[in-house]
């Protein structure tokens, strides 16, 4: 465990306590704005960087003490690189690895509730301090017989506070994401659904087994074994996987061959899930993967899985095809089905949004249009960020009176952006396998 992390003795669990924490964070952010504009009167050329840093610090500190959905949303936003100013991205990225862990007595309490026993009664050894702490739970290392185990424990109150937390995080999200209210509500419903699933550890164990088994044929991938008798709705026990996270691995300066091997395993893992299983590990942030000594990739967290409806899949990937051979009326139907345009739009709005989403999806589909793709190509990512910036500042987009895009697209887009981002960090060149009908 990182020693500089101060352990938390308690978590605010009641709605009133959690709301009070948000209100205090909101007051601090308000105060930061007042200070910023006071300084701006003295220094008219002052940019917002200092303001963003103060706000990011205050929001993150509050959310990391609350844990749960609010911190998870911050972590999600840090992955969408063109959504937030850099100060927020940098701070919120910490939610992936290093939220302040819970103190040991709270861990014991969760065990007593689930098993009627303490960790010492169940395992031969059990680390009193967490070895990793994230947004929904923290991990301890344990041993039993010849097995070394990872034990994931959910923070108290997280499952019960998903809905109320998302209501509280809404004003922050509106301000930070520059979305209109209808759009935000449209997506928050999907986020709430996924987060409620993510707090159900019995469901996670079931999905982990299903997907691990269905992907076991893919080269250079490893999955832990899960133990039902030592798991419950709030605790998961699985094999401990030795290795390091991507960031630490990259610091060892691995060869291009090794980078490509890990990158290929990642691509193949996602390809098989999306196109063959129609459900996908929809949380591709670096904290969910471990790289082992023999350049194999360990998948250690299946909390967030998105089941892909068939109709959405057909429409979405029809747009990713390189030469869209759809007739105009078929194309219009796809845009309506994917909720990019609606009957409420004027002809001008329909033309504008069709153009925007066509551009967006063809850019997202670029790796699919070649047999091999070099994710070290930063110009590809520059194009994505520039397009995101241009669209979010476009008058027509900002004044849209409705949400754009099917809610199913939220996690699928996030999955692909997260995957591309990981492959870019790896600087990997890979063979972009694709389903036959997409070739």
Image (tube, rainbow, N blue to C red):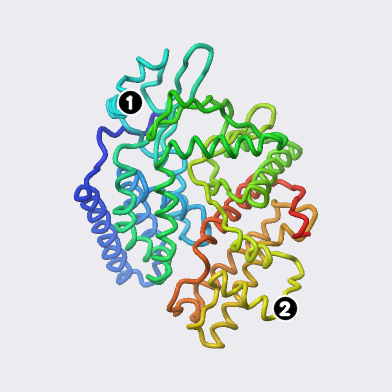
Give percent across and percent down for residue 252.
64, 33
Residue at image position (71%, 37%) is 218
Which is closer to the viewer, label 1 or label 2?
Answer: 2
Q: How many marks?
A: 2
Give percent across and percent down for residue 109.
28, 27
Residue 292 as seen in the image, left or right of residue 43: right
Determine which residue is flagged by label 1: 111
| Element marked by disc 2 | loop
Upstream in sequence: badge 1 or badge 2:
1
Q: Residues within 10 Å of mark 2 (few under 14, many from 20)?
A: few
Determine which residue is flagged by label 2: 327
The N terminus lies in which quarter of the figure? Answer: top left
| Element marked by disc 1 | helix
Q: Nearer the viewer, residue 220 or 336?
A: 336
- Image height of 219 relative to 419, above or below: above
Q: Could you say which quadrant of the image residue 259 lies in?
A: top right
Residue 38 as seen in the image, left or right of residue 438: left
């Amino acid at each position: 465990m990182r020693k500089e992390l101060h352990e938390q003795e308690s978590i605010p669990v009641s709605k009133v306590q959690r709301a009070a924490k948000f209100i205090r964070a909101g007051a601090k952010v308000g105060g930061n704005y007042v200070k910023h504009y006071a300084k701006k009167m003295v220094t008219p050329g002052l940019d917002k960087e200092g303001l963003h840093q103060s706000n990011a610090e205050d929001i993150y500190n509050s959310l990391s003490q609350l844990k749960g959905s609010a911190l998870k949303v911050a972590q999600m936003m840090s992955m969408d690189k063109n959504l937030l100013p850099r100060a927020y991205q940098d701070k919120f990225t910490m939610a992936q690895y290093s939220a302040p862990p819970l103190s040991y007595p709270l861990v014991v309490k969760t065990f007593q509730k689930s098993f009627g026993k303490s960790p010492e009664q169940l395992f031969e050894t059990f680390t009193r301090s967490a070895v990793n702490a994230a947004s929904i739970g923290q991990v301890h290392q344990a041993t039993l017989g010849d097995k070394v185990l990872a034990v994931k424990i959910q923070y108290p109150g997280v499952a019960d506070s998903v809905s109320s937390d998302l209501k509280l995080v809404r004003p922050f999200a509106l301000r930070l994401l520059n979305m209109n209210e209808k759009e935000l509500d449209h997506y928050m419903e999907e986020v709430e659904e996924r987060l409620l699933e993510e707090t159900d550890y019995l469901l996670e164990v079931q999905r982990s087994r299903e997907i691990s088994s269905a992907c076991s044929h893919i080269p250079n991938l490893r999955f832990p074994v899960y133990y039902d008798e030592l798991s419950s709705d709030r605790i998961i026990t699985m094999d401990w996987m030795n290795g390091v996270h991507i960031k630490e691995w990259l610091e060892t300066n691995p060869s291009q061959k090794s980078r490509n091997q890990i990158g290929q395993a990642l691509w193949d893992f996602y390809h098989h899930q999306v196109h063959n299983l129609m459900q996908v590990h929809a949380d591709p942030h670096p904290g969910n993967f471990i790289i082992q000594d023999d350049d194999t990739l360990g998948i250690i967290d299946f909390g967030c899985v998105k089941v892909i409806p068939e109709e959405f899949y057909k429409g979405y990937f029809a747009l990713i095809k390189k030469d869209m051979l759809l007739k105009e009326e078929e194309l219009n139907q796809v845009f309506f089905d994917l909720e990019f345009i609606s009957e409420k739009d004027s002809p001008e709005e329909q033309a504008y949004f069709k153009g925007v989403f066509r551009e967006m999806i063809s850019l997202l589909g670029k790796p699919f249009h070649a047999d091999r793709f070099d994710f070290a190509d930063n110009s590809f990512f520059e194009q994505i960020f520039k397009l995101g910036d241009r669209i979010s500042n476009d008058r027509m987009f900002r004044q849209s009176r409705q949400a754009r895009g099917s809610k199913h697209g939220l996690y699928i887009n996030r999955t692909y952006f997260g995957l591309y981002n990981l492959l870019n960090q790896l600087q990997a060149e890979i063979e972009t396998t694709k389903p036959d009908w997409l070739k």
